[in-house]
């Protein structure tokens, strides 16, 4: 149960950061950089940012569903499949949250 709560909190954090971004970012934000370049070469609406939390919320919740279906399954050496899927879900959500929060901070600093 505790691992499910961690995944849900990570998903909520991503959505909270998105809402703050939508409130404070300018309408047009940089969305593409050429390889090795520090100057953006593509701009788009700040509402394109909705795609990231939406996509990874579905993935995170989908992995929670897979974990609950496989709750009593064991793999190879008798270890719990549920624990493996939940640990993967937590790591994936945490890494995506870190990336998303860093990207939003970058946008705040470079579009103001």
Image (tube, helix red, strand yellow):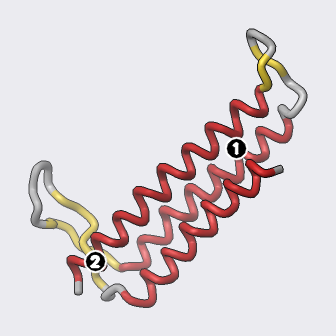
Which residue, as the protein is rendered here, is positioned at the far top? 77
Describe residue 17's horizontal placement relative to residue 3 as left or right: left
- Extreme-right residue of the structure: 72
Which comes sooner in the sequence, label 2 or label 1? 2
Disc 2 is placed on an element classified as: strand
**Residue 63: image tag:** 1
Residue 26 placed where, x, y %? 31, 88
Q: For mark 2, what is the residue?
A: 29
Q: In this view, does 14 lie to the left or right of 81?
A: left
In the rendered image of this protein, does residue 78 appear above or below residue 15? above
Q: Residue 30 at what x, y percent from top left? A: 24, 72
Nearer the observer, 12 or 28:
12
Specify the quadrant that holds the C terminus. bottom left
Instruction: Give the side of residue 94 with respect to residue 47, left or right.
Output: right
Q: Do the residues labelled 2 and 1 touch (CB within 8 Å)?
A: no
Quarter of image, res 87: top right
Within 10 Å of disc 1 (Cα), the crowding (few <14, some 14-19, many 20+) is: some
């Amino acid at each position: 149960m505790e691992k499910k709560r961690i995944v849900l909190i990570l998903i909520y954090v991503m959505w909270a950061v998105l809402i703050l971004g939508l409130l404070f970012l300018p309408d047009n934000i940089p969305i593409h950089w050429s390889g090795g370049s520090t100057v953006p070469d593509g701009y788009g609406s700040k509402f394109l940012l909705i795609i990231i939390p939406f996509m990874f919320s579905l993935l995170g919740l989908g992995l929670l569903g897979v974990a609950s279906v496989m709750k009593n399954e064991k793999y190879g050496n008798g270890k719990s499949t549920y624990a493996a899927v939940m640990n993967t879900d937590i790591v994936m959500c945490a890494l995506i949250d870190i990336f998303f929060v860093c990207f939003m901070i970058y946008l705040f600093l470079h579009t103001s």
